[in-house]
Amino acid sequence: MDFNDTPEEATFRAEARSWLAANAPDFIIKAGETLSDAEEVARGRAWQARLAEGGYAGILLPKSLGGRGGTIMEATVFGEEEGEYHLPKGPYIGIGLGMALPVIHKHGTPEQIEKFAAGTLKGEITWCQLFSEPAAGSDLAGIRTKAVKDGDEWVVNGQKVWSSWAHHADWGILIVRTDPTVPKHKGLSFFVVDMKTPGIDVRPIRQISGLSDFNETFFTDARIPDANRIGAVGEGWACAMTVLMGERLNQGGEGKHGGIGALIAYAADTPRDGGTALDSSAVRVSLAAAYAEERAERYFQARLRTMVSRGENPGALASVVKLAYTNRYQKTSGLAMELRGLAGLAPPEGDTETQRIQYDYIWSTALRVAGGADEVLRNQISERILGMPGEIRTDKNVPFDQL
Amino acid sequence: MNFDLSDEQKMLAEQARGLLGERSTPDRLRTLIDSGAEWDEPLWREIAGMGFLGASIAEEHGGLGMTELDLGVISEEMGRANVALPFFSSIVLAADAIQLAGSDAQKAAWLPRLASGETVATFAYAEGSGGWTGAALRATFEGGKITGLKTPVADGGIASVAVVLVNSGGKPALALVELDQAGVTRTKLDSFDQLRAHYAIRFDGASAELLDGAAAGQALERLFDRAAVQAAFEAVGGAEACLTMARDYALERQIFGRALAGYQAIKHKLADILVGVELARSNAYYGAWAAENAADELPLAASAARLSAIGAFENAARENIQVHGGIGYTFEANCHFFYRRERTLAISLGGREAWANRLIANIPGTQAEAA
């Protein structure tokens, strides 16, 4: 066991650090700077283009795709160093690199790889994910959006939801039902779709946070060329699994900024009874436990990366951090509001820290649902790691149109 | 970075798990409780023969000179088997105290005897419920004699020597005392943990010597931090044993026409225990790594390991009985060993509040010294 960099990792870190010092400052989002969504995406594309020039775009992606073909440790080291800067790295970049390219690489044709890989790596093509539907979230295979073959095109009708940043995406990865006469997992197919296709209507969702990160996406007789199908007809579920495996491994706690250390400083900065809120034993015990857990998540991820670097598949262990992190995030943001007293409900003007914590408390509840709900993750852990029985499924072998 | 046990450490874990699993069976533990035994002495001799007692003791003093992580691997297995052995008292605390604070002569005199298991030692720090820091530390060392009451002292009946936390000239210090002498009175207490006996030890001018090696001044905090990491490993082992026990029982037990393990209420409970165990293990690994490689990070790493492990074992020990239902409340089921041992580990070395204070006081860059 050695928590430090190997000599190779240290060399790579030094290279990355000096490259970032020379290139990142032009792209950072400065303190107090507010960008519109469109401005943020534009800057995110430009930063991605710069990364590609430097050879740091898609570190884990194979060289055949134009990636670096690097190791999980290199990706981690680069991520740590890049995390020192506040750069525009949203879903508009992450979905392309972490979901679209892996699924195109694994299930797509050489022509499709040629068409999308370079542009995505350079930030020229941004992506959204068109998976969930109003009646199919955790039960993704229950989707109803259908595609019907018409010549060498597919005609798509239905509704997708929770598509992050779809309003700024060039392309989408889409799962649809192409055969309702077979059981639900078997009748699905996978496509990439140009978001400018006629018949696609993206509508922002007004969220409880007041923001609109997510969208509803309506398909009304939208036509997709068969050439944009990824994998065989009926292979949609396998493609979706490729995407979701990548998603789980990329989830984790936040970087070294913010987090519980910031909340402890916040408690120490909150006056109470002549001292501060951090003088309270109850506050100290709660925050210390959360700090310990935050560290544990980081070291647990280090264990997972060690497994991956040896070619082992962590499987459902990758769910552990997401489950722990989102719950801790919600609990501690709630606690932070409470330790501030009534000012936690209505902070004085200029108290941006409390505003940030209020936002965290709202956002945490989305994270417990998005990208694998708590309950789904607990099922995976108990079934795949502990070997407990699967859920009773009454729909598994029944044709979809007879459910 | 490589954040996993080495192949040798995995073999060590297997070896320890095999032996302890075979010898320290639940039936053996029940027999020990019924007979009033304070330890499993034959097993102590056996693990001494395998070198486990000397794992972290320097080679020049009869040990194997292994790392804190190797010792942690063994501690985890001690926890998994819920052993009735003075391993924590004699090796993790007393031997480490002598290694950290003792002079060369003191190390040469005592460590070989502890590594071979021929002598059992303990560490006497508590003085009732009032803590053992600052003014609460009342046992005094003066002119080669100790006076005061230490209680409770784990394994105080079987130990023949104790490292005692004393006030020496207004400062905390560690003294070495042989227990079989006039001036030492040992009274057996009613111990909550039926497999770890506790004693009150009264010193009335008992002969003692200070551990007076060059590093004695810095030894005390390091001793507690290092022991906290080992206790975290022990708790992780115990918690994982509870998880396995609960899972196995739930798979076997039929209820409303199917296995208990098929119900989400049970699946999700056990998933949460697994999350707690794996997070606690991760902090324990880092604690052991920091003890060897990053001494300045040890206070924070040890506090974090300690807090995570307490939480994980507490939840696992409680929910294990819950999953078992009524049978879990019987002496014949095996849950109770862990339910009691968990409290021992949670409270020894100081509880959650003390370690939360230590953690917060050691976070770099916050103005949190208010402790």
Image (cartoon, helix red, strand yellow):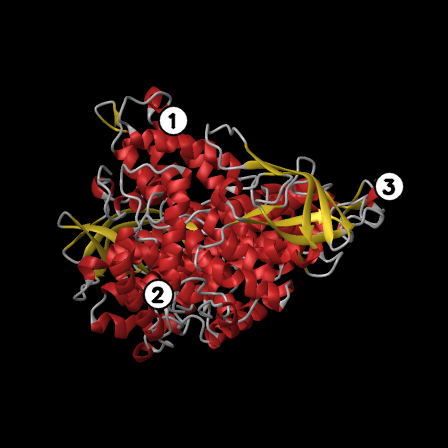
Residue wearing tag 3: A402
Residue wearing tag 2: A54
CB contact under 8 Å: marks 2 and 1 = no
Callout 1 secondary element: helix
Residue toward you, A199 or A323: A199
The type of residue carrying mark 1 is Glu
From the viewer's perspective, is B25 left or right of B286? Answer: right
Nearest-to-viewer mark from 2 and 1: 2
Q: Which mark is residue A374?
A: none
Q: Position of residue A143 (x, y in %)?
A: 71, 43
User: Nearer the N terminus, badge 2 or badge 1?
Assistant: 2
Residue wearing tag 1: A338
- In the rendered structure, the residue with mark 2 lies on which chain? A
Q: Report crowding for label 3: few under 14, some 14 to 19, many 20 or more residues within 10 A (C-alpha).
A: few
Residue A48, above or below B152: below
Q: CA distance from mark 1 to mark 3?
A: 51 Å
Q: Quadrant of the N terminus of chain B?
A: bottom left
- Residue at 78% x, 45% y is A393
- Residue at 81% x, 46% y is A180
Residue toward you, B84 or B240: B240
CB contact under 8 Å: marks 1 and 3 = no
Callout 2 secondary element: helix
The type of residue carrying mark 3 is Gln
Nearest-to-viewer mark from 1 and 3: 3
Residue A354 location, quadrant: top left
Callout 3 secondary element: helix
Residue A389, above or below A8: above
